[in-house]
Image (spheres, coloured by chain):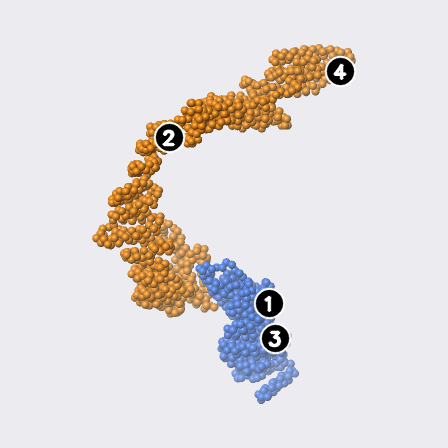
Chain colours: A orange, B blue
Amino acid sequence: MKKKYTYFIILFFFSSLVYSNDKDKRSEYLNILDQEINEIVRLSKSVGRKNPTVFVRMMYVFIQKGKLLKEQENEKFLRISPKKRVDLDKRRFFKKSEKNFRKAKKIANFGIRKFKNFSGKGYFFHGLSEVALELGEKKGFHENIKKVFRNSKKGSDIHKKSSITLAEYYYNNKSFSKAIRFYENGLKGRKDRWWTKDAYNLSWCYLLTNNNKKALRLLKQVYYLSKNPNFIDVSYRSERELGYFFVMAGKFSDSIKFYKAGDGKLEEKLVRVSKYLVRKGKHTAAEKLLEYGLSNIDKREKKTNLELQILKLYSKFGKYSKHLKISRKVYKKAEKDQLDNYQIETFKNELKLVVGIIQKQVISKRYRRNKRLLKRKLFQTIRYFEYLARLEESDSYKWNFLAGETYFGRKNYKKALLYYERILISFKSSKKNKIVKKALEGFLASLKKAKIENEKKDSLTIFGLKNIILFEPKTKRSNLSHQRLFSLYLKKKKINECENIIFNYSKIFRGESKILEEMITKVMSFYKRNGNKKSLYFWAQKIKNKEFSVGPNLVKKSNLILLSLKFSKVESDNVKGNKKDALAGYLKIYRNSKNDAEVRKNSAFNAAVIFYEGKDLRRSYYWVKKALNLIRRKEIFKFEKTIISIADELFNRRYFKESSDLYFSSLKKVCFTKSKNKGLLLKNSVLIYLSNGSHKKALESLKWGDRCKIDGDAKNFVRLELIKYFNENSKLSDLEKYLNLFSANKRMRPSLIFYYDKLKAYLFRSGRFEKSNRVKSKMLNYYKQSKKLGYKIPLESLEAISKIVKNNIDKKISRLNRVVFNFPENKFNKVLKYKLKKLDEITSECLNLMSLGSSYGIVNGYNILIKAYDDFINEVLRFSPKGRSKEYISSFRASMKRLIGPLEKRGREFRYEAREKILKNSILSHENYKLLLSPQDNFINIKYFPLKDGILMDRGGLN
Amino acid sequence: MALWYKLKLLSIIFFQLILLGNNVEASLKKAERYYVETGKSRKNYLLIAKNLMKDGYHFSAVPLIKEVLFHHKNKLRRAFDDILEESISKVGVRQFESMDFKILMRSKTPYVRYIIARKLFRMKLYKRSLSILNLDKIKIDHPIRPFSLMLRGSIFSIMGNYEKSIDSFKECVEKSKDELDDKVTKKEKRQLLINKDICLLGISRTYFAKKDYKKASFFYLDIEKESYIWPEVLFEEAWSSFYQRDYNRTLGKLVTYKAPVFSHIFNPEVKVLEALTYLELCLWKDSKKSVDLFYKTFQSPLEKIDKVLETYGKRYKPYYLLAKKRLKQEIGGGEVFNKMFLSIVRDPAFLEMYDSFDRGGAEIKKIKRLKNTKFKKFLIGNIRETLILQRNLIGAYVRKSLDFYSAMITKNLTDMSYIKLEVLSRLRKEILDNSITSRRTRGDIKYLKRNEKQYFWNFNGEFWADELGDYVFALKSECKT
């Protein structure tokens, strides 16, 4: 078992010196290494002194640990900014790893000293070489590797590996002969996984020492072994390089045979090899190989990559004729969509590269004597530009331009024109493109220099001018081109084109009114001369609409033309009283003048007036509304009175809806003017809306009242009308809402008290006593305030207040009546005193009620007083003390009679005063019957009611 | 009938007649008389010894026999050999084993041959051992023959003569079985049973040496679980399974050592094999755990053992006393230490020696009851000498065992170090290969291998006598290839 693991210790360290990049892995790895160190130390204590393998392993563990720590340190080091890094002590930074390397070195040296006869002494030297490598001691590394080679058993792994290392060392130092010796030694015997990789290097060594056949043989072996999964795969490189090896051995046909025999595509392989050969500077070989390839591949499609590759070689070595020949073939394939994107790109690049070179040659004076060659090169250049233009459709103009330029350079203006024209045709918008601009210049320059017939030249000139306008619309040259083009068209009587130029010119050159005016005048004159009224009208209309910036004279002239064309006949009909024809005329004008608001306004209003005069109010309303829409605010004053007349007439004829709408529409129109009719229009519109039950419209009108700054009285009137409307139509929520809203205006309050009373009654009836009481308080409050401010309070409001006061007095009387006389005397006297006091209070309150000024208050005040006095007197007189002697009773009554004497007198006075006041002030009150008839006459308190109800009328009259 | 045989028979009859005649007078008295007659001279030693042994004073007789053997320059008489054989059969071979084999060579009794062969065997002089043993000269019914066969089988096995070895072992098994029926004492029966099993084990071992592991395993199964050596067999079976790459069975065998009945078995190698098996199954963590546990368990006891060995050196008495304490259940010094001592004191060889020593103790008591004469003094001197030797033999045995265990633990620690290093290497390799498996599917019957004598028992933590050694793990190897 021990032997087995000893073997393993050493084998393992050769096979697993691989670095871990992952941080976690590294720390885990380090942890294991630490454990291993501990274990080996433990082991060394028991067997170490006798067993060198323990020291070998210990040495490798330290090397491994050192390497990992170095990686870690290196990462840290690289994270530091380069500036700071300069000042750092690098040795100190790599202290940990170095410590481990030194330990390993120490162990190795100890092992070499202690175990002189140890057959695996090479391992210690190997460790020393590793340490030297890590510490950057190149010499030490090389020396020790040599020692490994010398001190290890021939054929052992370490011996072979050290051979390979030495071989690599010599290989890198380009000592290929020496490297061969070590490689051969290292590759002897069993082939391990790395054999292919090392043999690959060896084959190169052979090649570089002119042992071509050996090299080829070995590389072939490497290639075939690489396909075996047990070996490192260097087949890709070796397959590629075999081409080179074949070439070096002068075996072209063999190479084709070799690549044909292998897997994969021959075409790809040949391309790869040719590229490689080019990189190695073996261009002729590469070319030859590719040509061999082309002649050995039968299918055309498969040749593409070879063709592209060979094109590169041809271009590189100036073989342009061959280049053209191959390019033609490739281009045909491209046209047939047989090329993939990459191939197309490669082909294009190739073409671009070559065309760049040969174009310069064509334009330069280099071949001026060799006309034939020049012609051929020119042909090739133009052909390549055409290919490119077709391959790059989006940039075709660039290639056409270059073709044009090439022809221009060669003074072939006629052909140059063709290419420039192609570009200009392909650009239909005025893009800011330098090449297009240059093409235009080229076109113009070529046009100037080309010798061609006049007619053709004219058409090319027009094309040129158009393009100037298109590509540089705002330049001076464009301005002149417009004028030149206009003249050319006018000369050819192409009036439509002329008109187009005017439109275009007016858009671009707004400031150039004189030139524009000139052009328009020329066009209008043309139409006038030809009697084309329609076109004339068209141009006049345009000028009127200010579509062109022209001078006032032309405007005036064109307006005159317009009006004279429009109203001339209709006006004459109206004046002559030919109303029907006039009306038809206005309506026709209205219909035909869809874009002319002025004309439409006048024709609509005139039509409305004619309908009004003819008593056709509905139609009048219809047309006046049309006109109203077209009338501008500042000119409403001209139409205001007529419109009000039409609205009044509409109301009179009970067209309430139309009437109110017209009032309201007029109000909106006059709203922001200084019109005096604003209040009237508001009142009328609101009243008619309310009579028609449209309180929402009325409210909207009221809002307009605010916006239009109509005076307060008119608005208050409207508000009160609205409150009335809500009350009459039992719209209690609205009533409450607007009462509260309008009561903010103190002037409104006296009028609103009455409606508050109504609201109070509604609330009371619906059981909302508390709210009803709040309304009552509000009423009393508003009454007091209004009185204080000296506002006039309407009678109905006073009556409402009187009712409240009366109710309070009634309550007091009721309380008074509940207290009755009683004996003994002191008790009687106390009641009497109380009752007299209360009577006095009632008297003053009744006087107060009467002073409110309402008929209801006056009548009821007197009535209450009279009744209260009468009741008191009767109660006193009727009272007889019980259980008292007759004498006492009679004396008591006598004294009572004396007491009530003045009261009786006062009662009589009140009755007289009441009667006087009712009659004198013509008070009409429901309570009058109580006072006007004497108690004797009206002892049953009778009242007269009319037999029939009165006739109810709404705001619109009879319902 | 051959002439030599007739003569031999006659001599035996004659010798027995002499003994019978002598028996009329009390043997002890006779012995005393011979002693008085000769004084300190060795002249009558053989007769004294013979008479003492007749009266059951075997231990007192041993120094006299040894003395005769030591000083006798010529070939010894047949009568001496008989006395010697009887003495060996009563006090055991070890009293004589300590003698130089050149002296022992003076006698050619089967017992002595056996003793000499054993000594030579230990000295690795296998050929000489074989020639001395010469089974042709040991009678078929001689009690030592089964043991000699065992020794011969072992020698052949070591010498690589496997066929002969197997034949010897097989004969040994048969012979031991035959002898068992004739034996009366428990001790003798035990010895023969052990011998039979050792021979069976020898067969297995020989097949094992032949690398015929399957046959080896097959014969292991013939050793009954009641056998004293079965724990050892179990361990060998485990190794056998290991070599057959039946790692789950190896672990199953090893787990049996945790059974309470094996509490006296001290074998640190069990742990080594366990760690090694886990290593082979690529269960790195388990393997590492076993190693670490081993360090934890044995590192300090080893120091203790070494300290004991260092302190007592080759003074055997303290070792004997230590063993005696253990026998009296006076435990101390930690679990491993105790277990180790338990293992020593329950060993049949130890028990045999101790038993002899005990019997020697009884004999000394018997002598003490005799009248105070010079002879009594002489006897006491003799028996003391014998018993001191026996005690030293016991002590030496204990010391040797301790030394052996110390070496074994030391070696095992080294082995464990290698195992741990191997585990660490593989763990490192796995990190580099990025192939540490996170999921471990353990325990599946499909990972088991068995032959027709093996049964599969699920181990549920309890150890049943009939299941012992038949446990099989079902761990999946986590090795990549």
In the image shown, does B199 or A478 lie closer to the viewer?
A478
Classify A805 as above or below B407. above
Element under disc 1: helix
Quick check: A504 left or right of B401? left
Gap between marks 3 and 2, in whole Å?
Answer: 146 Å
Q: Residues within 10 Å of mark 1 (few under 14, many from 20)?
A: some
Q: Chain of mark 3?
A: B
Q: Residues within 10 Å of mark 2 (few under 14, many from 20)?
A: some
Residue under the point 61% across and 67% down: B465
Q: For the residues tagged 4 and 1, is the chain the same?
A: no
Camera-nearest label, 4 or 1: 4
Residue at image mark 1 = B467
Q: Residues within 10 Å of mark 3 (few under 14, many from 20)?
A: some
Q: Earlier in the sequence, mark 3 or mark 1?
A: 3
Element under disc 3: helix
- The answer to whether one can see residue A199 in this image is no
Q: Where residue A68 sits: x, y (%)?
A: 41, 57
Classify A877 as above or below A63. above
Q: Earlier in the sequence, mark 4 or mark 2?
A: 2
Classify A665 as above or below A253. above
In the image shown, does B79 or B26 lie closer to the viewer?
B79
- The answer to whether one can see residue A794 in this image is yes
Q: Quadrant of residue B361 in the image?
A: bottom right
Residue at image mark 4 = A881
Gap between marks 3 and 4, in whole Å?
Answer: 154 Å
Residue under the point 58% across and 18% down: A795
Q: Which mark is residue A544?
A: 2
Camera-nearest label, 3 or 1: 1
Q: Which mark is residue B189?
A: 3
Q: For the residues tagged 1 and 2, is the chain the same?
A: no
The three-letter amino acid code for the residue at tag 1 is: Glu
Gap between marks 3 and 1, in whole Å?
Answer: 26 Å
